[in-house]
Image (cartoon, rainbow, N blue to C red):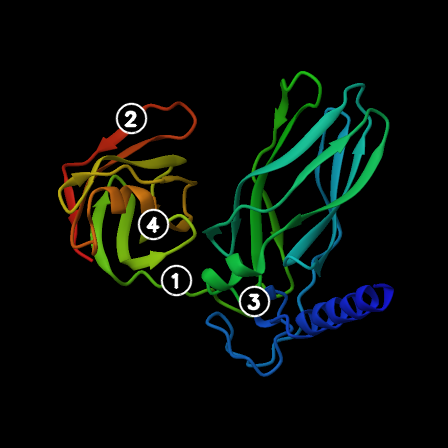
Amino acid sequence: MKRVLAALLVLLMITFVAACEERPVPSSGLGDNKGEEGNNSPDPSPEPVSVAEEIVFDEKGILIKVTGIADSWLGPEIKVYIENNSDLPITIQARNTSVNGFMIEPVFSCDVASGKKASDGLTFSDSDMENHSIDVIIDIEMEFHIFNSTTWDTIVDSQPVKITTTAAGKYTQTYDSSGDLLLDSAGIKIVFQGMSEDLFGPGANLYIENNSNQAVTIQARDTSVNGFMVEPIFSCDIVPGKKALDGLTFFEDDILDNGIDTITEIELSFHIFDADSWDAILDTEPITITP
């Protein structure tokens, strides 16, 4: 039995090492993809990017400093150093985060007790980098949401923070806005870019631009698939001047329960409102998507 267990352990270790060796590098966004030509780089072998160490937030006894950028097992990570010189336990999170102009949410939530320090990082997944065709990270923008870890009361929401890498001025991010134009009103542009399938079920892929001067949330109302009322998963937050790749995801069970074999028509109305005040900005007339 011990020999069998030992053999299984060796096999698992070999499999793990092989998987690590085969991990794709081009989607890391750090510019170290030798021999790969990305959508946002004129150079097939760009130099690895870095960021300057700088204090990006220093208020209410709380200091946040960017210390570098590295590639983690999940994807590129912005390293941060935090000091909590206040008399409250705090949690720091990132909101309204974008990479190269695309709204992308990082993995980041840091608890720091009063009088303590922490080293942490904002991590972006390789899959998000690949899905947004980001080969080289040029800049990252975000707002820090800081609240009391015990009471959850907001302490402060920072002004937008911009982190620029050494790739700035050397590379330009490209944006694929091709597809069927669904909406271009009130500074909001929405384009249908085909169907896809994920863990939950079929989805309608959307390219979205916010060319207005306010942060908005976009949701779907009165949605039907092939004439059957089916509610999708969809709520997109997007700040001014940014772009997003999002989509309407339908549960596979909802599709099957309505006897739908192939999606031939999706009808919906977009409900767009101010992300801060929740005031309505636009409710569209019914829009038809023909996959």
Q: Earlier in the sequence, mark 2 or mark 4?
A: 4
The residue under label 2 is 280
Left or right: where 37 falls relative to 148:
left
- Residue 71 x, y percent position in the rendering: 69, 61
Q: Earlier in the sequence, mark 3 or mark 1?
A: 3
Amino acid under label 4? Ile
- CB under 8 Å between discs 3 and 2: no
CA–CA distance in space, label 2 to label 1 = 28 Å
- CB under 8 Å between discs 3 and 1: no
Tell me the crowding category of disc 3: few under 14, some 14 to 19, or many 20 or more residues within 10 angstroms, Cα based: many
CA–CA distance in space, label 4 to label 1 = 11 Å
Mark 3 or mark 1, whichever is nearer to me: 3
Foreground of the two, 159 or 256: 256
The residue depicted at 85 percent of the width and 69 percent of the height is 3
Mark 3 or mark 2, whichever is nearer to me: 3
The residue under label 1 is 175
- Residue 230 x, y percent position in the rendering: 24, 38
CA–CA distance in space, label 3 to label 1 = 16 Å
The residue depicted at 75 percent of the width and 73 percent of the height is 14
For the N terminus, the quadrant is: bottom right
Q: Earlier in the sequence, mark 2 or mark 1?
A: 1
Q: Which mark is residue 291?
A: none
The residue under label 3 is 27
- Residue 68 x, y percent position in the rendering: 74, 55
The residue under label 4 is 208
